[in-house]
Amino acid sequence: MTKPSPFKWFKTSPEIIRLAVMLYVRFPLSLRNVEDLLHERG
C-alpha cells in the first residue's frame, strides 16, 4: 500500500517545498531570504 503524500493539501509542487525546507535548514537564512532565493530561481 502506498503512503499518502504529505503535500496533498498544498498548491505548490512538492519539489519546491522540499527545496525551500532544505535551504531553510541548511543555511542560516530567514524565511524571507528563502522566499527571495526561490523567487530569483523562478
Image: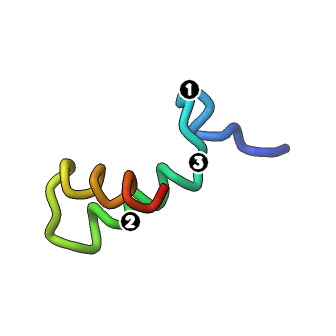
Q: Position of residue 38 (x, y in %)?
A: 39, 56
Mark 2: amino acid: Met
**Disc 3 to disc 1, C-alpha distance:** 10 Å
Mark 3: amino acid: Pro
**Disc 2 to disc 3, C-alpha distance:** 12 Å
Res 27 → quadrant: bottom left
Res 13 → quadrant: top right
Q: Position of residue 2 (x, y in %)?
A: 80, 45
Is disc 1 placed on a helix, strand or loop? loop
In the rendered structure, the answer to whether residue 18 lies left or right of residue 20 reads right
The crowding category of the residue bearing disc 1, from other C-alpha atoms within 10 Å (few below 14, some 14 to 19, many at least 20), is: few
Q: Earlier in the sequence, mark 2 or mark 1?
A: 1
**Disc 2 to disc 1, C-alpha distance:** 20 Å
Q: Quadrant of the N terminus?
A: top right
Identify residue for label 1.
Answer: 9
Residue 22, above or below 12: below
Is disc 3 placed on a helix, strand or loop? helix
Mark 1: amino acid: Trp
Identify residue for label 2.
Answer: 22
Q: Position of residue 39 (x, y in %)?
A: 38, 52
Q: Which residue occupies the foreground of this view, 30 or 7?
A: 30
The crowding category of the residue bearing disc 3, from other C-alpha atoms within 10 Å (few below 14, some 14 to 19, many at least 20), is: some
Is disc 2 placed on a helix, strand or loop? helix
Identity of the residue drawn at 32% across and 60% down:
37
Answer whether labels 2 and 3 touch (C-beta < 8 Å): no
Identify residue for label 3.
Answer: 14
